[in-house]
């Protein structure tokens, strides 16, 4: 009698292929930081500016913020805080991509398909793990990015401009004030942003990529993957912008002003900035 073939079990490592994604994601993220970091700096400063009693603003719009920053700080001033991002972006993407792949593997059907709900859960889980690295990275980055805006305000008021902060100096200050958990100020707002972003991005990117994939191809053409990533990323970013604004302000303003939570921040800032902020 011939032996009956045993059903093959899933092999985790060959199917996940985590390492190549980590390497590719890390390299792509570093290149992306070098290209778009000035825009991220402008975003942070626009999010942090408050409206004066007569409706005056420090920056009129995004272009005005670019001009003022370049005029005051020069080309390299547009990259203030980028070193922290470059240092921590690889472990951040490693956790995010690996977590999404692992969640998708265990939530997939036996035939390899995965429902939209489980894709969303996988993305949300990846975003939750990502927040563990993103929170301290964003905390340091935002403090460094916003220093120029604060210096401009002090200079306009005729005050004495303090020494520019450094990443190492901020690290020591945060640790002395709150210990290890001092680096996780604003983690709830960060988690809301990262969970929401990944819950939208990963399923949308997978669906859009599949639409451009031919039956005899493993992956879609590069141009289609680029468009899919752009559409999914833009949609996700717009959806979580309110959470990103709250996170930015929680990680910048004095802790006493926000009472250390999202509700306290809303109460403190809404009379000055309004709902549009």
Image (spheres, grey):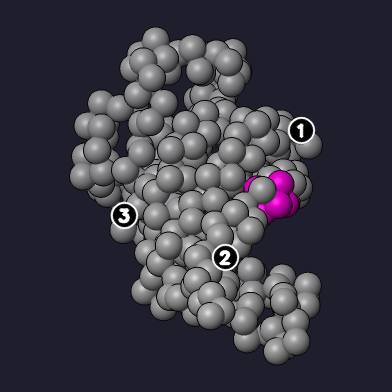
Crowd band around label 2 with a 10 angstrom C-alpha radius: few (<14), some (14–19), many (20+): some
Residue tagged by mark 1? 76
Residue under the point 69% across and 84% down: 213
Crowd band around label 3 with a 10 angstrom C-alpha radius: few (<14), some (14–19), many (20+): few
Residue that extends furthest to the bottom in the rendered view of this protein = 215
**Is label 2 or label 1 in front?**
2
Residue 180: give its label: none
Q: Is residue 121 depicted above or below 126 in this figure? A: below
- Give the percent coordinates (x, y) of residue 157: 50, 25
At mark 1, the secondary structure is: helix
Residue tagged by mark 3? 274
Cα–Cα gap, marks 2 and 1:
27 Å
Q: Is residue 3 depicted above or below 164 in this figure? A: below
Q: Is residue 21 magenta?
A: yes
At mark 3, the secondary structure is: loop
Q: Is residue 175 left or right of residue 95?
A: left
Cα–Cα gap, marks 3 and 2:
27 Å
Q: Quadrant of residue 122?
A: bottom left
Report whether residue 181 is seen: yes
Q: Is residue 263 left or right of residue 239?
A: left
Residue under the point 72% across and 70% down: 226
Question: What secondary structure predominates along the stretch shown in magenta?
Answer: helix
Which of the two discs, 2 and 1, labels the residue nearer the N terminus? 1
Q: Quadrant of residue 33?
A: top right
Q: Is residue 117 magenta?
A: no
Contact between marks 3 and 1 (CB within 8 A): the answer is: no
Crowd band around label 1 with a 10 angstrom C-alpha radius: few (<14), some (14–19), many (20+): few
The quarter in which the C terminus is drawn is: bottom left
Residue tagged by mark 2? 233
| Span shown in magenta | 20-24
Cα–Cα gap, marks 3 and 1:
33 Å
Residue under the point 44% across and 71% down: 108
């Amino acid at each position: 009698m011939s032996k009956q073939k045993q059903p093959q079990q899933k092999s985790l490592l060959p199917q996940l292929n985590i390492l190549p994604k980590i390497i590719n994601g890390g390299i792509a993220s570093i290149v992306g930081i070098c290209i778009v970091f000035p825009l991220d700096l402008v975003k942070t400063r626009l999010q942090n500016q408050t409206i004066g009693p007569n409706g005056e603003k420090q920056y009129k719009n995004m272009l005005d913020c670019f001009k003022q920053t370049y005029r005051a700080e020069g080309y390299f001033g547009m990259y203030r805080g980028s070193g922290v991002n470059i240092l921590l972006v690889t472990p951040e993407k490693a956790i995010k991509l690996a977590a999404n792949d692992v969640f998708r593997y265990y939530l997939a059907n036996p035939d390899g398909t995965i429902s939209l709900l489980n894709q969303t859960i996988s993305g949300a889980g990846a975003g939750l793990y990502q927040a563990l690295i993103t929170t301290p990275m964003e905390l340091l980055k935002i403090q460094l990015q916003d220093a120029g805006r604060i210096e401009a305000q002090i200079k306009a008021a005729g005050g004495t401009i303090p020494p520019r902060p450094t990443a190492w100096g901020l690290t020591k200050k945060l640790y002395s004030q709150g210990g290890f958990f001092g680096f996780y100020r604003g983690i709830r707002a960060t988690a809301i942003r990262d969970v929401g972003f990944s819950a939208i991005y990963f399923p949308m990117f997978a669906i859009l990529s599949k639409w451009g994939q031919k039956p005899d191809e493993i992956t879609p053409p590069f141009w289609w993957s680029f468009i899919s990533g752009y559409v999914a990323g833009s949609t996700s970013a717009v959806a979580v912008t309110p959470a990103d604004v709250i996170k930015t302000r929680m990680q910048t303003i004095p802790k006493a002003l926000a009472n250390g939570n999202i509700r306290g921040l809303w109460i403190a800032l809404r009379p000055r900035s309004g709902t549009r902020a």
